[in-house]
């Protein structure tokens, strides 16, 4: 009997450690440190082409036969664009921005492909296509997907607003168009960003301390690194992805 | 000399030119109908016309009175006979060829399809008009004062009309014929239901014997077709013709069509366009026939039989009326036949039952009752109905108000009341049976005898009887009872036939329309 | 002077009568076929080149004609409209003036064969609608056969051997499909085959009303019924449990073959059927003929929604490892009562013992070399009541409380009673790999050997 | 004794007429009754008290032990000991009537994603939702009903099932969506409107024009676990959660989380969803709900 309880408590603890760790406390951050860096790729990877496989001719008309996936956008200096860089657990820090996350279904693609939504704000999902889309946002927990919202957007210019409730890395898909994909990091703290076209990123206003920074790229995968931030100073943390 | 010259070639020439007159004269024994005398003689001397009087009562000529129903029924019979003879020339009554010869009549015989349609529709029209004729006779109270027996003959003619139609239905040997034959033979067999219960079947199987007699075997086959053919073209026509003759003869002998006792000729006003009033030219008598010497004296004389004043010469009054009805009838049948084909389905196939297998439409009221109990629905209730109808003149001996529609307003009220009560109760009962079923659905193992004794058809019959008796009791008039009984009969026949024809589908289940039938 | 009412009634009726009788007469004088014959005569004359031909064309008379074939008891009046079938000059005209295609009429002269023996339709009729008998209001049992199925008529007089040499490819492929898709697994034909479906003898010469046409789309004819039935059995017969997977082309071919299964025999002088040598079929062919419709390749264990039960994967190595040939043969011979598996022995489905042996050895080909270790099972120690308790909690969910089956197989069965104890024990203990049957033994869900024995003694008592 | 005054036949016949009209009326009434009966059925499985009970029960140790025992006996076969849906029975394959093979993966209880809920998309199912599923089973999926178990035992199972996903402790329960069926659902007018919506909402993309689940997208759909799934075939008439109008409505409103069926709570008004219910009831040929 005790074993059961123990198991239960343990399970709760471990699993919640992954996705539902302690609350975030908002404090006034003055003279905090920052983390900057460049995410690079070890080698050039060709951007795969998405085949638009549909039996409905009107969808081909709208979206074409193929589309660039935009998965591997690697600059001349090997910088990787669209890498999510975030610190999962920050006990204290500045206030979260009030900024709705706008996700648009456009020409059978999600725009933007990668982005950050903040807890306490909303997802604003729009369908700009005259075809049916359903936007299914699913939280990735331990490699498994768990639906957060599965929203139907059957008509053009339909907009649905939903609060960001569960935090973590979300995969977005559309059941009607299996090639459609997007990634959203639903953050419970403001310390998350995306790399720019040269692979550079910066996370500002961190209280001094040691943080676990996660780099996530849909093609290369994810990696978590430790970094220590001192007050008022930028810490550097680079990462080079190599294709497995 | 000159006479002898003339009696040669010239006489022959005269004879040739005089052929028209001499033929007319020899044909019309009394010469051309130029005077009242010769007009009367024309009627009396003609074989076909002599069954009618030289003079006809004005009432007989009022279309609103007879509606020409009996006459139409008779004409339809004539048309059926003539078209039947034409169709018969090409028809071959064997199961190998019956169907294909009917197809040939349709496809390659000149006007064959039309003839077959005329035959079919005039035959079925007979049923309608015989029933309507019967209704007219009943509602105008015309089965009295010596006409009682003619009513019985009429009932026989009704039954013969049904049987004649039924036998004709079998002849094309298509699916309709075959499965109607099966149904009818099962109906005929239905006394078995009772003998089974009484345990008598092994001793005397009345139903089985009847069925074998009808089918000339145990299943419909070549012998059945021969038998039915013989009935249809020989036996039944001869019998029906005989009875029609007797029927007409009795009309004449029983004093012609009924006339209201207080018939008041207002012909100058409202039937001037119906008859040709005799022109009085000369003579010592006035147009009003009187008897005795009073006519010689001045002043008003009593009219002895006022009816005599109300008669007109049959020629041309009656003759033209009859001719008009005949041509109208023929035209109607032909027009109908041009546009509506007589049904002909697939060749008979004993392995593919029609579902629902239905008897001809005029028996579907019976089939509806058969679906409750075969024995009651097919034997007892039809017998009792025919018996009840036949006995009407003998149970209603009230001799007043003859020749008046519904015997006046009281009868009209009874008829309408019966119509409403009858329709509502019958439809209600059918709705009950359709929705809730009957004993067999409630107690699946119940003995069949209970269903034979207590089933919707029996209850309905009891209700009809009770209603008629109650009418007799409440109005104090047997005539009203007769009206109630007959109205109930008509209502039942109509509603049951409608339900059986339109609302019953496969397995005799209830459907609002054919579109809802589960298969085909 | 006459009475006005009746006189005018007489006059009007007489006029109506006259008008309609003339109308009817005119209609009778100008039937549909006359226009075709007149047009034919014109075309014939135009196409004729030699004066001889011209003369012939000019001599052609318009009039009703028919082909009467005494031996076949048929009257065909098709040539009233299809006037040019035997005239080579009409080869390029439109139907119905066109000459008959191919050289068929050389071997099958119209005067001896007529038309409807091959083409079906109503030979008696003299108008297109009723002659072609399409549409249910024409009331003819055999509507005209669509040309894509025309080969189905050849088998009346020719055998398959002859037809395969003379290019009747459609029907040959249809027969092949019939044998390979396992049709006989459910349908009997000439005495052997399963009993789940209707017997197919004479199905090709059944009248329209033999087939329930309510849900058939388009023309309600036998070929449409068959084809739509092959494409989606449930659409045509909602309660059907038939399993079939055919492409539309295959469905057409199979329809042609099924239509050729007729009972109508033309007289002997017409028939060119020689006895075909009976080729003994091997196990694989027999499996395709009788088993494949349900068991498919024998690898998939799936609950079948049509048959309302799981079709066991008989080629599953996990099954073959435990089941010996004797057991499989017994199941094939006796069938499994209460399931769609029928008894296949001679007395019911008509297979000889030899054929059954062949099928069993074909099935057994998939058996691996290793066989499971024997275990000793003593049923006498089994406690039925204890078994029942376990069964109701652990097994009844799939096998049904009375063993009637569901996701799991039916256990209330003679076969289970007769089955080897070891076979049952191993099945319960080790489960059946690749099927939902889990291992219940100590390595799996934790039943002890004794508990398994208890369960076996319970299920043997169903 | 009434000897002199017999009841008149007129009276009897009037009574007869009245009896018949009453009968006809009662037929109509009986049909009305048949319409309402199933709705009551759906509710009585979980009464309001039970709901409260289940929530109050909390993490009672005895209850969890009982739940584990029952889970071990009845559920482990499919859902696995760790609740990840990978039990020894594995994937259940079903050959549909159309010949398509449908793979049924037992639910992975660890992700906290459940299809049959009475709460909005993304929300955790309420205890009564889980209890209903356990009690009634899921049609066509081989998830059996557990009516043989006592209510306490079933509640214990609910409590135990909830331990597999941390979400149940981490998240607040959402507000329950009540299905209040308007009277006009099933009327001809509503069906016509529903049919237009069915087209407008692009339902045929997956479910096909005739509702037989063979729309152009029907082969591309995967669930949260990456398993291929098939859209519902309305023609079979059997919705997995039970084909009452309320359940159809809830499916439209809540979506089936984890599967491809999205929530229409935000894209359609309440009234429109009920119109769509009317039309789908017709597709499912549920004559008893149609007017």
Image (cartoon, coloured by chain):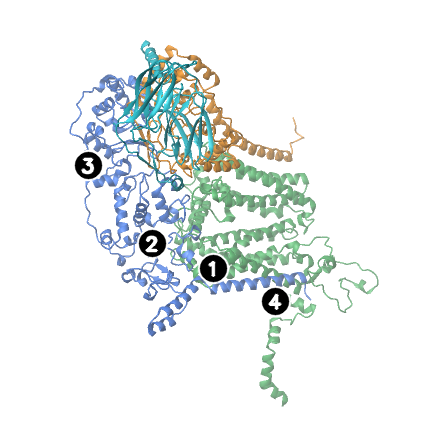
Chain colours: A cyan, B green, C blue, D orange
Contact check, label 4 and label 1, Cβ < 8 Å: no
On residue C362, the disc is 3
- Mark 1 or mark 2: which is in front? 2
Compute the Cα span from label 3 to label 1: 64 Å
Q: Tell me which chain the residue with mark 2 is part of.
A: C
The residue to which callout 1 is attached is B113
Between disc 3 and disc 2, the foreground one is 2
Q: Which residue is mark 4?
A: B46
The numbered mark, 3 or 2, whose residue comes first in the sequence reads 2
Mark 1 belongs to which subunit? B
- In the figure, residue A235 lies in which quadrant? top left
- Chain containing the residue with disc 3: C
Is C45 situated above or below D93? Answer: below
Position of the C terminus of chain B by quadrant: top left
Q: Judging from the image, what secondary structure is the residue with disc 4 in?
A: loop
Image point (29%, 57%), residue name: C267
What residue sits right under mark 2 in the picture?
C147
Q: CA distance from mark 3 to mark 4?
A: 97 Å
Find the distance from the CA under tag 3 to the CA under tag 2.
40 Å
Q: Quadrant of the N terminus of chain B?
A: bottom right
Classify 10 Å Cα crowding around label 4: few (below 14), some (14-19), many (20 and above). some
Q: Is residue C350 visible?
A: no
Please name whichever residue, B370 or A233, is drawn nearer the observer in this view of the structure.
A233
């Amino acid at each position: 009997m005790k074993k059961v309880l123990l198991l239960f408590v343990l399970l709760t603890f471990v699993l919640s450690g992954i996705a539902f760790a302690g609350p975030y406390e908002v404090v006034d951050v003055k003279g905090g440190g920052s983390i900057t860096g460049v995410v690079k790729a070890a080698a050039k990877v060709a951007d795969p082409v998405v085949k638009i496989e549909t039996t409905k001719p009107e969808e081909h008309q709208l979206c074409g036969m193929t589309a660039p996936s935009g998965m591997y956008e690697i600059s001349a200096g090997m910088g990787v664009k669209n890498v999510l860089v975030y610190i999962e657990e920050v006990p204290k820090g500045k206030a979260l921005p009030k900024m709705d996350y706008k996700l648009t279904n456009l020409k059978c693609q999600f725009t933007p492909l990668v982005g950050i939504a903040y807890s306490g704000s909303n997802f604003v999902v729009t369908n700009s296509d005259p075809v049916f889309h359903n936007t299914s946002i699913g939280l990735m927990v331990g490699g498994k997907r768990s639906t957060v919202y599965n929203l139907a957007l059957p008509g053009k210019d339909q907009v649905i607003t939903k609060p960001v409730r569960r935090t973590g890395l979300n995969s977005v898909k559309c059941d009607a168009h299996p090639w459609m994909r997007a990634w959203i990091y639903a953050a419970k703290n403001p310390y998350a960003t995306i790399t720019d076209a040269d692979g550079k990123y910066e996370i500002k206003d961190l209280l001094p301390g040691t943080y676990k920074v996660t780099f996530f790229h849909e093609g290369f995968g994810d990696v978590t690194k430790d970094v220590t931030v001192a007050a008022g100073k930028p810490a550097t943390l680079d990462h080079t992805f190599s294709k497995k | 000399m000159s006479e002898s010259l003339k009696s040669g070639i010239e006489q022959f020439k005269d004879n040739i030119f005089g052929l028209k007159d001499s033929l007319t004269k020899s044909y019309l024994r009394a010469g051309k109908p130029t005077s009242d005398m010769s007009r009367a003689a024309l009627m009396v001397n003609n074989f076909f016309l002599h069954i009618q009087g030289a003079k006809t009562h004005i009432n007989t000529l009022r279309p609103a009175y007879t509606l020409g129903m009996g006459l139409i029924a008779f004409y339809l019979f004539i048309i059926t006979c003539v078209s039947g003879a034409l169709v018969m020339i090409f028809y071959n009554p064997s199961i190998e060829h019956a169907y294909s010869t009917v197809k040939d009549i349709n496809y390659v015989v000149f006007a064959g399809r039309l003839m077959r349609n005329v035959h079919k529709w005039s035959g079925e029209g007979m049923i309608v008009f015989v029933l309507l004729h019967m209704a007219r006779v009943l509602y105008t109270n015309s089965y009295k004062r010596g006409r009682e027996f003619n009513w019985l003959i009429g009932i026989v003619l009704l039954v013969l009309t049904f049987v004649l139609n039924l036998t004709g239905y079998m002849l094309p040997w298509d699916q309709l014929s075959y499965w109607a034959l099966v149904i009818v033979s099962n109906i005929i067999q239905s006394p078995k239901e009772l003998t089974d219960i009484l345990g008598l079947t092994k001793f005397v199987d009345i139903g089985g014997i009847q069925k074998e007699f009808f089918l000339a075997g145990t299943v419909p086959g070549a012998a059945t077709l021969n038998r039915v053919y013989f009935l249809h073209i020989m036996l039944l026509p001869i019998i029906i013709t005989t009875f029609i003759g007797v029927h007409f003869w009795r009309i004449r002998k029983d004093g012609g069509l009924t006339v209201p006792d207080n018939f008041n000729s207002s012909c100058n006003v409202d039937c001037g366009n119906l008859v040709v009033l005799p022109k009085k030219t000369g003579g010592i008598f006035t147009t009003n026939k009187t008897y005795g010497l009073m006519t010689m004296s001045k002043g008003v004389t009593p009219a002895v039989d006022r009816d005599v004043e109300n008669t007109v010469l049959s020629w041309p009054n009656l003759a033209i009326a009859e001719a008009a009805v005949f041509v109208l009838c023929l035209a109607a049948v032909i027009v109908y036949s041009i546009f509506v084909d007589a049904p002909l389905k697939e060749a008979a196939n004993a392995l593919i039952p029609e579902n629902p297998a239905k008897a001809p439409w005029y028996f579907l009221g019976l089939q509806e009752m058969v679906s409750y109990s075969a024995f009651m629905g097919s034997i007892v209730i039809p017998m009792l109905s025919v018996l009840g109808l036949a006995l009407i003149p003998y149970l209603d001996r009230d001799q007043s108000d003859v020749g008046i529609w519904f015997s006046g307003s009281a009868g009209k009220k009874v008829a309408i009341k019966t119509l409403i009560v009858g329709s509502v109760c019958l439809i209600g009962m059918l709705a009950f049976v359709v929705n809730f079923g009957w004993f067999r659905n409630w107690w699946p193992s119940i003995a069949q005898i209970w269903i034979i004794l207590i089933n919707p058809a029996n209850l309905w019959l009891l209700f009809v009887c009770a209603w008629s008796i109650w009418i007799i009791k409440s109005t104090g008039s047997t005539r009203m009872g007769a009206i109630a009984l007959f109205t109930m009969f008509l209502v039942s026949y109509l509603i049951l036939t409608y339900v059986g024809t339109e609302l019953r589908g496969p397995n005799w289940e209830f459907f609002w329309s054919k579109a809802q039938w589960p298969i085909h | 002077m006459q009475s006005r009412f009746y006189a005018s009634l007489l006059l009007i009726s007489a006029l109506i009568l006259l008008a309609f009788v003339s109308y009817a007469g005119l209609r009778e004088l100008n039937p549909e076929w006359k226009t075709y014959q007149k047009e034919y005569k014109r075309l014939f004359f135009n196409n004729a080149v030699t004066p001889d031909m011209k003369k012939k064309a000019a001599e052609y008379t318009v009039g009703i004609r028919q082909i009467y074939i005494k031996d076949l008891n048929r009257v065909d009046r098709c040539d009233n409209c299809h006037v040019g079938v035997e005239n080579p000059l009409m080869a390029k005209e439109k139907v119905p003036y066109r000459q008959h295609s191919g050289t068929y009429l050389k071997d099958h002269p119209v005067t001896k064969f007529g038309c409807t023996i091959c083409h079906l339709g109503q030979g008696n009729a003299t108008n297109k609608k009723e002659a072609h008998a399409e549409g249910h209001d024409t009331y003819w049992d055999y509507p005209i056969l669509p040309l894509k199925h025309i080969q189905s008529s050849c088998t009346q007089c020719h055998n398959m051997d002859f037809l395969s040499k003379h290019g009747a490819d459609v029907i040959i492929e249809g027969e092949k499909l019939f044998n390979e898709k396992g049709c006989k697994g459910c349908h009997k034909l000439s005495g052997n085959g399963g009993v789940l479906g209707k017997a197919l003898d004479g199905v090709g010469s059944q009248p329209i009303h033999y087939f329930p046409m309510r849900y058939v789309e388009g023309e309600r004819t036998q070929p449409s019924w068959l084809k739509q039935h092959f494409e989606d059995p449930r659409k045509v017969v909602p309660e059907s449990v038939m399993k079939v997977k055919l492409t539309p082309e295959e469905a057409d071919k199979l329809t042609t073959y099924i239509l050729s299964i007729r009972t109508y025999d033309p007289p002997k002088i017409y028939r060119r059927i020689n006895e075909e040598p009976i080729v003994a079929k091997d196990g694989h062919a027999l499996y395709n003929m009788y088993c494949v419709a349900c068991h498919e390749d024998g690898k998939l264990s799936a609950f079948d929604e049509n048959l309302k039960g799981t079709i066991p994967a008989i080629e599953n190595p996990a099954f073959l490892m435990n089941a010996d040939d004797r057991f499989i043969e017994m199941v094939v011979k006796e069938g499994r009562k209460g399931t769609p598996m029928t008894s296949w022995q001679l007395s019911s489905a008509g297979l000889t013992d030899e054929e059954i042996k062949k099928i069993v050895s074909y099935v057994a080909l998939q058996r691996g070399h290793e066989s499971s270790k024997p275990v000793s099972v003593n049923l006498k120690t089994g406690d039925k009541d204890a078994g029942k308790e376990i069964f109701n909690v652990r097994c009844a969910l799939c096998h049904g409380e009375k063993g009637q089956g569901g996701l799991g197989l039916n256990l209330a069965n003679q076969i289970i009673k007769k089955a080897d104890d070891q076979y049952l024990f191993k099945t319960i203990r080790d489960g059946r790999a690749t099927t939902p049957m889990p291992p219940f033994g100590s390595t799996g869900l934790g039943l002890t050997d004794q508990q398994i024995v208890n369960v076996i003694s319970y299920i043997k008592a169903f | 004794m009434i000897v002199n005054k017999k009841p008149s036949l007129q009276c009897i016949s009037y009574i007869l007429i009245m009896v018949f009209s009453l009968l006809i009326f009662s037929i109509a009434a009986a049909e009305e009754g048949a319409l309402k009966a199933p709705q009551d059925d759906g509710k009585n499985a979980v009464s309001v008290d039970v709901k409260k009970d289940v929530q109050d029960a909390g993490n009672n140790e005895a209850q969890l032990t009982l739940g584990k025992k029952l889970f071990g006996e009845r559920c482990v076969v499919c859902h696995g000991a760790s609740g990840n849906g990978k039990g020894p029975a594995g994937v259940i394959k079903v050959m549909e009537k159309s010949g398509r093979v449908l793979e049924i993966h037992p639910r992975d209880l660890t992700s906290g994603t459940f299809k049959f809920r009475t709460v909005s998309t993304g929300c955790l199912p309420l205890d009564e939702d889980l209890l209903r599923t356990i009690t009634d089973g899921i049609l066509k999926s081989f998830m059996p009903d557990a009516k043989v178990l006592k209510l306490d035992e079933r509640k214990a199972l609910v409590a135990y099932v909830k331990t597999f996903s941390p979400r149940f402790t981490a998240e607040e329960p959402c507000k329950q969506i009540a299905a209040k069926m308007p009277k006009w659902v099933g009327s001809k007018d509503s069906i016509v409107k529903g049919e237009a919506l069915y087209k407008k909402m692009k339902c045929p993309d997956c479910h096909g024009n005739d509702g037989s689940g063979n729309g152009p997208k029907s082969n591309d759909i995967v669930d949260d676990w990456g398993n291929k799934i098939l859209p519902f075939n309305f023609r079979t008439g059997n919705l997995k959660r039970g084909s009452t109008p309320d359940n159809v409505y809830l499916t439209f409103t809540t979506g089936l989380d984890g599967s491809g069926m999205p929530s229409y709570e935000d894209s359609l008004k309440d009234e429109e969803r009920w119109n769509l219910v009317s039309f789908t009831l017709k597709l499912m040929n549920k004559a008893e709900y149609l007017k």
